[in-house]
Image (cartoon, rainbow, N blue to C red):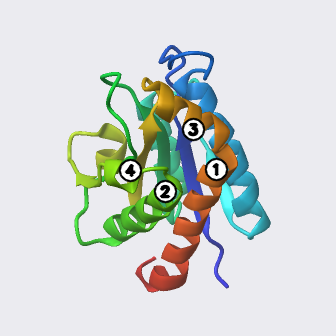
Amino acid sequence: MEERVIYLSPSAQQNNIGVGDFGSEEYRMNRIADILENILGKKGYRVYRNNPYDTLAQIVEESNRINPNIHVAIHSNAGAETAQGPEIFTNRENTPSDMLANYIYDNILDIYPDREKGRGVKYTTSLYELRETNAPSVLLEVAFHSNEQDAKWIMENEERIAQAIADGIEKFFNDYSNFL
């Protein structure tokens, strides 16, 4: 089997604090990335990660230098107190990035307490990390860390979230390795 290389980019937004005692976006997403990196490493993937203090330009430069098979950014949304649910972004419709986005998103929805609040797979060319990264790439917004219910769900389900992301990545590689 050819080596599978993944670049993980958990949020580096240190001051993006959630509600209550649920921690910052950076803290929560790095916790999930730690668990995810461990899961993927045990499955034989080579995983690279950004330095938490890197700028987006540095993250993209490093990812492009490493030339991974896929690039996965992991974030949590902030917004109105009532906003809820996961969403995932890609800028490449009907491509491997789109397929990866759908697999990860579907797995996150499977564990999210209210599937109806899922916000979907969205296409954008405005997100720098997706636009400038050469590898198939996605940016997952796990849920809204500014909504207490979502923030609590993220905190209580870090391992399940990481496993859902890993399962989406695994399904992508199993089904679409010929694209890579």
Q: Earlier in the sequence, mark 4 or mark 3?
A: 4
Left-right relation of 14 to 34: left
The residue labelled by disc 3 is: 154
User: Which amino acid, by three-letter code, is at mark 4?
Assistant: Thr
- Image position, residue 101 (x, y; %): 38, 61
The residue labelled by disc 2 is: 108
Q: Residue 48, labelled with which disc?
A: 1
Q: Nearer the viewer, mark 4 or mark 3?
A: 3
The residue labelled by disc 4 is: 133
Give the secondary structure at mark 4.
Answer: loop
The residue lying at 44 percent from left, 39 percent from top is 143
Give the secondary structure at mark 2.
Answer: helix
Q: In whole angstroms, how far apart are the C-alphas of marks 3 and 1?
A: 23 Å
User: Which amino acid, by three-letter code, is at mark 2?
Assistant: Ile
The residue lying at 57 percent from left, 48 percent from top is 8
Q: In whole angstroms, how far apart are the C-alphas of marks 1 and 4?
A: 14 Å
Q: Can residue 52 be seen in this view?
A: no
Left-right relation of 54 to 4: left
Q: In which quarter of the image is residue 28?
A: top right
